[in-house]
Image: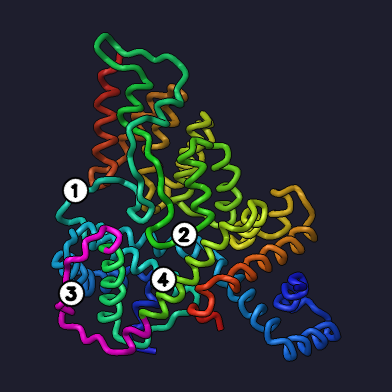
Amino acid sequence: MEFEKIERYLNNELDSHEKEIFEKQISENKQLATTIKVYKLIDEEMQTNPEQEKGTIETINALSKKHFHQAKAPIVSMNRIFKITAVAASIIGLLFVGKWLFAPNSVSKEELLAMHFPKENISLTERGSNDDTLYQVEQFFNGNQPQQVLNFIQPYIRNHPDAALEIIAIKALLQLNKSQEAIDIASKISNGRSAFKYEAMLLMAVAYSQMDDWSNVVSTLQQVPPTAIEYERAKSFLQDIEHVK
Amino acid sequence: MHSDQKYIQALLDNDYALMDELFANYAPAIIKMINKNGGTTADAEDIFQNALLKIHQRALKGFVLTCPFNAFIYTVCKNMWVNELKIKKKNRVTFTDTCGYTIEENVFENESKIQMGLDRKVLLDKKMKELGQSCRELLLLDWSGIPQEEIAKILQTSHGYIRKRKSECVGKLTALIQQSPEFEDLMWD
C-alpha cells in the first residue's frame, strides 16, 4: 500500500494529474477507499492539543473543589485528574548531597525535605483513557529517569504550555539539581493565575533549599496564602525551618 | 442540536460561569446516584470529572448533543460507575432511580456516540503499543502538534524522512486496526 501517497493525497499535495489517477483508483478499489478513511480518521483522532484542553481541565478541577470538596479536607494539592500517589521513599530528599546539619535532636536537610516533600509517583493518565505522551512521561518520571522526562516533555511544553506538565518538568529539574532552571519555570507559574501557582511556590522553595538560599525559601513560603491548599505544607515547613540553628 | 449544547460549548470555551452552573445543576444527582449505589462522594467526584473530560474530548472531535444534558450526563456517569463496580467486583447494586430524569432513546444514542469514540481511542492506544518504539515516538511527537522540521531536529534526521516515515507508521497502525476483531463494531465511516 502506498501510504506516502495517501498522506500526500489527504494533505492535498498531489498535482492535478496524480490526484485524478489516484481518485480513479479509489473509486475502483473499495479496500483502498476504506483504508484511506481509516487512515484519515486515525490521524484526526490521535491529534492532541493540550493547549485547548488545559484551561478546561483546570476549570473542572477548580469547580470540582468548589462543589465536591466543601465537606472534606483536601488530600493532595495537585489536580485530581492528574492523580498523585504518595509512596514511602523520597525523591526530592535524595537530591541533596551536601551536609546541612541541624542542632542536636534535629534532623538533616535531607531528612527535613524528605519529610515535607515525600516522593510522589505520578499517574498522568486518567482512568479509562490513555494518552501515550503522558504515559511515557509518567513511566520515565516514576522510573527515576529525570533527564528522559525532560527530553520528552520540554519540546512538548514549548509548543503547548501546560502548567501541570511544567510542574513535572520542575520536579525533574530538581532531581537533576538544576535549581535555577526550576526556579525560572516555577516563578513564571507562581506569578500567573494557574491552579498550580502555589504548588510552584512550594517547588521554588525546594529549589532555593538546594541552593542553601534560606532567606528566599522563607520569603517564598510566606507568599502562600491561608486560602491555598498548599498553605498547611508551607506553614509546617516554615515552622521546622525556624527551629534550625 | 439540543439547546443544552450550551454546556458542551461551555466545556469547549472553558466558560467558567456556565460550567459552574453545570456543576451546580448536575453534580448533586450524580453524588446521590453513586452514594445510593455503593460509592462515596469522592467516587462521584472522580466519575463526574472523568465524564466531563470524556465529553470534552469528544466535543473537540465534533460531538454534538441532541438530547437533554441532565439525562445524558446521568447516563454517562451511571455507565462509568457500573463499569467501575464491575472492576471492583461489586455487582450487588440496582439502579432503580433516575433522579427524575427521562431517559429516552436519543439519550442512549448520544451516550453511545461518546462511548464509541472512546472505544476507538482505546483500540488505537492498544494498537499503538504494537508499533515499534521509533514509530511510536515519531507519531506522538507529530500528533502533539510539533512541526515536522522540529521533530527532524529532535530525532536527528531529515524532514523528508520524517514525512515518509510518518506515513509508513500511520499505515502500519491502519493495517493493525483493520485486522483487529473490534474493527467492524466501531463504525469508522
Question: CA–CA distance between discs 1 and 3?
Answer: 29 Å
Within-10-Å neighbours for mark 1: few <14, some 14–19, many 20+: few
Magenta part of the protein: which range? B86-110
Which residue appears at 53% of the width and 37% of the height? Answer: A146
Dot 3 or dot 4, earlier in sequence: 4
Dot 1 or dot 2, earlier in sequence: 1
Mark whose residue sits in front, 4 or 2: 2
- A26 versus B181 height, above or below: below
Question: CA–CA distance between discs 3 and 4?
Answer: 26 Å
Q: Amino acid at mark 1?
A: Ala
Identify the residue under disc 4: B56
For the question of whether residue B17 can be seen, the reply is no
Identify the residue under disc 2: A130
Mark whose residue sits in front, 1 or 2: 2
Q: Amino acid at mark 3?
A: Phe
Q: Main secondary structure of the magenta part?
A: loop
Q: Amino acid at mark 2?
A: Asn
Question: CA–CA distance between discs 1 and 2?
Answer: 29 Å
Question: CA–CA distance between discs 4 and 2?
Answer: 15 Å
- Given residues A185 and A120, the one toward you in this image is A120
SS state under label 1: loop
Mark whose residue sits in front, 3 or 2: 3
Identify the residue under disc 3: B95
